[in-house]
Image (cartoon, rainbow, N blue to C red):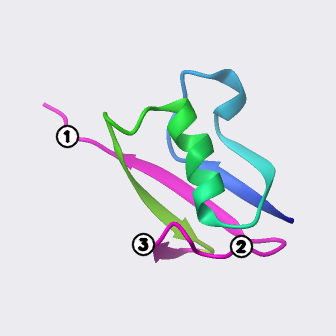
Amino acid sequence: MAQIRVKLGFLSRLNDAEGEKIVEATNLSEVLRLAREAYPSDFYTFLVFKNGVKVEGEDEVLGDGDEVTVIPVFSGG
């Protein structure tokens, strides 16, 4: 299993999910599961970047040293 750096582009309701951390994951769906636990997806959609490049599919394979950035998108008013 690869060790990757995950940057969450928002403050979580859960203290352990804030900011940046190193996690073990083999694909993007495992990382998004962590983000959805922090913020349920019924309120947000997520923009996801792997090593600075936007990623669409959750089956994206991750390798050692990859950096994944997760940013929630929601409307404001």
Per the model, the C-alpha gap separating discs 3 and 2 is: 14 Å
Q: Name the residue under label 2.
A: 62
Kindly identify the amino acid type of the residue bearing the numbered disc 2: Leu
Residue 69: percent from left, percent from top: 57, 58
| Mark 3 vs 2, N-terminal side | 3
Residue 73: percent from left, percent from top: 32, 48
Question: Of 67 and 26, which appears nearest the observer?
Answer: 26
Per the model, the C-alpha gap separating discs 3 and 1 is: 20 Å
Per the model, the C-alpha gap separating discs 2 and 1 is: 30 Å
Q: Residue at x 51, y 39 (%)?
A: 36
Question: Of 71 and 44, which appears nearest the observer?
Answer: 44
| Mark 2 vs 1, N-terminal side | 2
The residue sitting at the left extreme is 77
Name the quadrant of the N terminus.
bottom right
Secondary element under disc 3, as helix, strand or loop, is: loop
User: Do callouts 3 and 2 mark residues in contact (Cβ within 8 Å)?
Assistant: no
Tell me: residue 60, above or below residue 77: below
Q: What stretch is highlighted in magenta?
A: 52-77
Secondary element under disc 1, as helix, strand or loop, is: loop
Badge 1, how many Cα within 10 Å: few under 14, some, many 20+? few
Q: Name the residue under label 3.
A: 56
Q: Mark 1 points at which residue?
A: 75
Mark 3 or 1: in front is 3
